Image (tube, rainbow, N blue to C red):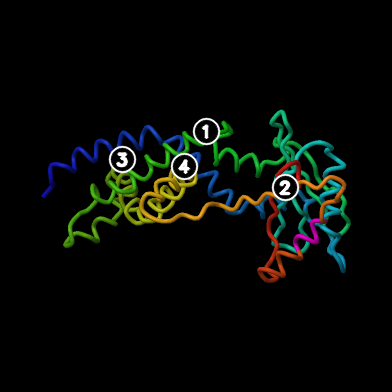
Amino acid sequence: MKTPIKPLLLKIHRWIGLTLAVLLTLQGLTGASLVFRDEIERVIHPSLVVEPQAARAPVQALLDAVEARHPGVPVNRAEFPAWDDGAILFKLTAKDGTRWLTAVDPYRAAIVRDGTLAAWPGEWLFLLHDSLLAGPVGETIVGIEGLGLLFLALTGPVVWWPGRKRLKQGFRVVTGRGADLQWRSLHRAVGAAIAVVLVVSATTGVLMVWKPEFRDALRLVTTVADKPSPKVAERPGTPMVPLDGLIAKARADYGANELRQLRFSDGGR
């Protein structure tokens, strides 16, 4: 027997789903492509596949090559591939907001690919998924979309619930009785099956958009450790320690873990 709340939830569920349909489709397609982003980029950008040598060039030499190509443009991060034959990708953002990506051969310290966002479809798709290419405004829209998806994932099983005795029928896709019924029954069955995954995806997506607000809310009920933001005093006339020295120090302190990413501040340092 249907409870009075079900028809109302179903109506709201449908309208939110229709309103967010385009955005949810966009997020789903871009998210699926990002899962295989590294593999795809190695195919569409053959220059990212390099010939391994006996020894790698110092990481500082790689950074120096990037800074020589883009003088005065701050380096944001360096991403190290999982493959021995992969180039290291440096990401830079100019003062006017232009994004540059520069791939460097880790064995020869030679730049193998360089270009703005338009030349890197994988990065373009990531930013489309992350913020709809609209910066903070886009992130807010994605956050609202995540709240909508969370509502759909939570109310969907309530509307779908067929009862214990008819549980199997809730996962049955009706065929041979028209396309409309077939698609609706497929939607109900698949939605119910992946509801938990959608709840996790929507919740984590929303928390990523509003991390500071979520952290402040947690402070009301528990102790929260802030993200480390180390600062050091400038020493005029004293050269900075090369990156490789910092990496060696980190490995000595935390173990010889695989290096996957470096993040920079203050003009690439």
Magenta stretch encompasses residue 255? no
Tell me residue 170's x, y (percent): 25, 55
Q: Nearer the viewer, mark 3 or mark 1?
A: 1
Q: Give the answer, above or below, for where 251 lies relative to 59.
A: below
Name the residue tied to disc 3: 180
Q: CA distance from mark 1 to mark 2?
A: 27 Å
Q: Is 238 on the left-hand or right-hand side of 98? A: right
Pick the residue in front: 102 or 193.
102
Mark 1 is on which residue type?
Answer: Gly
* Label annotation for residue 138: 1
Amino acid carrying mark 2 in the image: Ile
When asked about the image quadrant of residue 125, the answer is: top right
Identified at 31% across, 46% down, the residue is 182
First in residue order: circle 3 vs circle 1: 1
Marks 2 and 3, the one that precedes in the sequence:
2
Q: Are marks 1 and 2 in contact (CB under 8 Å)?
A: no
Q: Earlier in the sequence, mark 4 or mark 2?
A: 2
Report the residue that reaches farthest toward the left: 1
Q: Which residues are magenta?
A: 242-247
Q: How many marks?
A: 4
